[in-house]
Amino acid sequence: LEAELAQRRRADEALLESEQRHRAVIEQASEGIILTDADSRRIIEANPAIARLLGYTLDQLVGRLIYDLIADTREGVDARIARVLESKVPLVGERPFRRRDSSVVPVESSAVVVEWSGRRVICTVVRDITERKRAEEALRQSEQRTRQIVETAHDAFVSIDARGYIIGWNAQAEATFGWRCQEAIGRELAETIVPPQHRQAHRQGLKRFIASGEGHVIDRRIEITALHRDGHEFPVELSISPLRIGDTVQFNAFIHDITHRRQAQRLLEQKNRELEQAVQSERQAIEKLKATQSALVQAEKLAALGQMVAGVAHEINNPLSFVANNVAVLQRDLTAMRRLLELYRAQDGLLAAHNPAVAAEARELADRIDLDYTLANLDDLLARSREGLRRIQQIVGDLRDFARLDQNQLQEADLNAGIESTVNIIQGLARKRQVRIELKLGQIPPVTCYPAKINQVVMNLLSNAIDACKPGDMVTVATRAENEQVQIEVADTGSGIDPAIRSRIFDPFFTTKPIGQGTGLGLSISYGIVQDHAGRIEVDSEPGKGSKFVVYLPLHPRK
Ligand SMILES: Nc1ncnc2c1ncn2[C@@H]1O[C@H](COP(=O)(O)OP(=O)(O)OP(=O)(O)O)[C@@H](O)[C@H]1O
Ligand SMILES: [Mg+2]
């Protein structure tokens, strides 16, 4: 019996110790623990954690009705207790508890029913989730704000999952693409807003990004074509950014319809082009005006000069021809008269014997005019006069050739002859400047042209060449025929042309000469004349060494 008593005592001690251990656990627990009698609904036991949470002392809690602690109606609490009593496993849920000061605290509770020496007791474990709730609420608000921003954005917002299916679609997306949000969500993006011709590329791009993380269109602003529900395509600007969530990814895109911008751009470009065209045609008009002006000036110059030259030549020609005739007659008659005079002189003695006074007077006169010398020189004098007259006739002829007022229509002309006349006219100027002109005229066929105008061209080239020369320089004029064309070449050893002005020398009124000396029309007129003959002018020049102008003329410009 003693042994039995000792065993009982040991068992009691073990029990006591176990109970003390459990009590310690309950009292130390950070979670609230409440034991409630299922029938009376009164609290049998509570731990310090729950007392702290709800603002009671442990004494105040024990014996209190459980309804006081839960922020719910009595019916609500009863219904829940009924469910706990039926359930074999703990019922877990979130519910608001009420503190002693009536404030409410959100908790997560787990309740289970246990049998305790015939009584049914509900054991409830309570955890304060105020912090979690606050975080959840903050998150919810942040999400809502984001959603509002997205919803009110002026851009369409579209997001897709890694497979390319639509998971986000805002109001502007509805307006832009014509699909309502509920319709769009769950559709494949490629089938919805990507035009058929781009779908393949879109799907491949998506796959490539998933596989390698590389994409041409990611995180950049790009312009592409999109498809509206009604089938029409339109330009959009979009930026896509991937969003990694765990080990999957979604893509968010802001898309902006740029139809109007494109239209404005196109309009602007169109206006620009029109403006350019206007400027261009104005420039052409000015060019044409200049050309017309210079042609007019030239025509007048040419006409006036031609008329004057022709008039002078004509007026000189008449007296010139009778003077020339008379000189020829004079030369013939003088020969006879000299013969007669010699006969008389041979009879000098006879006259002196008969009439010494007359003889003396004749001798005195003969001495005064140095008769012997005069008689000896007479032939030479007359020959030189006739040569002079011949030269005057030549010049007058050249002037008439040059003006050629009688030849104002197309005709076959010997260009070499015209060039010779022109050189003759300008020879005086060349000599004055001490510039030698050399002619190298080749065998050339007759050229169908306006001869006076071609003479004018040669004259302009020659006077430019002489202007560019300093004393001792030389100008060469050459002609040759080649491939149904003749070439007239005027080359000088003068100053040459600065490459910087090379492209402007044919411009009307471009001159480097002092005011009053050059009008800057020579080359532009020559250019026009040569063009009228379906020909061209080429220039070759080296500063300091000289220039070479070559005129190419077809033999028959109209054919
Ligand atoms: N042979 C040349 N050597 C050097 N410069 C030349 C030669 N020919 C023309 N030029 C340059 O080209 C310019 C234009 O020549 P252009 O014959 O058209 O006008 P200009 O001789 O100045 O005046 P204009 O001929 O009307 O009297 C000249 O001022 C000169 O600078
Ligand atoms: Mg000139």
Image: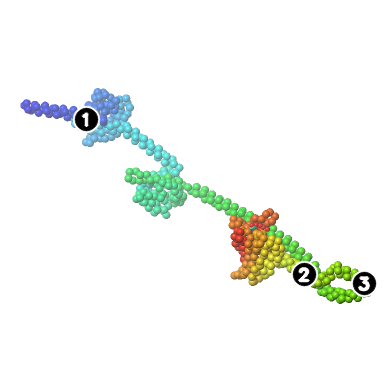
Quarter where residue 296 is shown: bottom right
Who is closer to the viewer here, 539 or 167? 539
Residue assigned mark 1: 25
For the question of whether residue 294 can be seen, the reply is no
- Residue at coordinates 60% horizontally, 62% vertically from top-left? 540
x 39%, y 50%: residue: 215
Q: Residues within 10 Å of mark 2 (few under 14, many from 20)?
A: few
Q: Is residue 203 left or right of residue 472?
A: left
Is 4 located above or below residue 225 in the figure? above
Earlier along the polypeptide chain: callout 2 or callout 1? 1
Q: Where does the C terminus fall, quadrant-wise?
A: bottom right
The residue wearing badge 2 is 384
Name the residue tied to disc 3: 356
Query: Residue flagged by tag 2: what amino acid is it?
Result: Arg
Identify the residue shown where x is 65% and y is 60%.
469
Give the mark nearer the N terminus: 3 vs 2: 3
- From this viewpoint, which residue is outermost toward the top? 59
Q: In this view, does 41 lie to the left or right of 233?
A: left
